[in-house]
Image: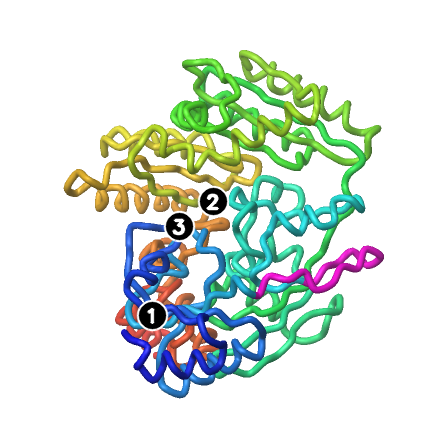
Amino acid sequence: MSNQDPIIQQLTEITGKGTVLFRKEDLIAYECDGYTIHKQPPRAVVFPSSTLEVSRIVKLLSAQNIPFIPRGAGTGLSGGATPLGGEVIISLVKMKRLLHVDLENRLAVVEPGYVNLKLTNSVASKGYYYAPDPSSQYACTIGGNVAENAGGAHCLKYGVTTNHVLGMELVLANGDIIEIGGAPDSPGYDLMGLLTGSEGTLAIVTKITVRILKNPEDKRTVLAYFNNVEDASYAVSDIIAAGIVPAALEMMDEVAIIGVEAGNYPVGHPEGLKALLLIEVDGIAAGIEPQIEEILEVCQKRNVTQVKVAENDQERARWWANRKTAFPAMGAISPDYLVQDGVIPRSRLPEVLEKIEAISSQSGLRIANVFHAGDGNLHPLILFDARKPGETELASQVGSDVLKVCADVGGSITGEHGVGIEKQHEMTFVFSDQELAAQTSIRDVFNPNNLLNPDKLFPKPSRCAEIRKAFSS
């Protein structure tokens, strides 16, 4: 493309000089998001600064039947912001303001490009924080969190993004601007629930009202080591069965532990360790110690080899840095890795982890398990070398096999990373043709020409046409 292209000129007229990328070398950074197996450059990238500019861009592109993709920080892990061919990316990173904070009503209003962790940092001095905390929270945007319904380590107790969104301003696929939510228990359909997690296929979010929480009086963090994955898995179920709902309950297996110890934030986990649990409880100070004692007792009953409580905030922060950088740390032990995101019932953890180990052995690819054990949200990291012919395809097949195991035990193919382009086929693991047709029919109401983040989330168009026919017959 060139700056003589009429679309480039028209986009520049809307957003101003220097706000549209179109040269090949500038588009390389936008040919994928955090899911790097599929890469395709966009037609152009435009950087609006306001809702009105987003609306004008959408109206322009819709009128000319040009597909477009909203994009945040590009940290997504399922290809949701990856072009498939010919799309214009609408990057929302310039819309990054904190618009309003209302401590009395415990809410904040942000633009979609506002970084997740910045919200907590902006209200921390007042004793408040924003609960959803994906591992990429230092970089990911709240708009992207809404698109994927992102979770995080502390979603076990506090819920995922949808539990903290109070209202939205949206630009629809035809460029219209609407507002939804804003009042508790509003009558009518739950459009916020529908839009949150819709992966940019229904509308573009341009403003978000979110819930902020008061800091708990106290928090304590436990690190427990085990000589086998089964004992650690049963300890997870036993803790919940004891009536304790930790703020976070994380697990890593041997391969994951090797990876994080080779990364930038090692903490000295023992060599040869088969599994660890990172457990955090918070709340009223007077109730913390009894929970800690019960957790320690459960771990002892499940043959823990060593268990310790963080002595101070610095030690706690080191443990969490070690856990939250687990994904990038895998780069220290493998040239490439593919992150999966299945969900299972907690009680099936030992069985599922055993099956994942069998898939690893059969394929010859190592799988590192690091996950939100408390709510059964698994993150198997499939380690491979893209330089070896066939290994990329093998890694993708292994990922699909793992998700099939999750679905077969009554779970799901994603808990927080979304479907994007990575798991479109796997949607058939959990939904019937009729159920998929019902969902694509909803998409068609909001996005009738499939121009807004086209051909994502659901099976490929030919398959969608087949299931729509089945649904109408």
Residue picked out by circle 1:
22
Q: CA distance from mark 3 to mark 1?
A: 21 Å
- Can residue 412 be seen in the rendering of this structure? yes
Identity, as a three-letter code, of the amino acid under mark 2: Val
Towards the viewer: 101 or 50:
50
User: Quick check: marks 3 and 1 in contact, CB under 8 Å?
Assistant: no
| Residue in the picture at 39% in, 44% down | 340
User: Residue 342's spot in the image, x, y percent?
Assistant: 43, 45
Residue drawn 47% across and 14% down? 270
From the image, state whether disc 3 or disc 1 is nearer to you: 1
Q: Which residue is mark 3?
A: 34
Q: Quadrant of the C terminus?
A: bottom left
Is 48 placed above or below 240 here?
below
Camera-nearest residue between 365 and 142: 142
Marks 2, 3: nearer the viewer: 3
Q: Residue furthest front?
A: 17
Query: Which residues are the magenta region?
Result: 95-109
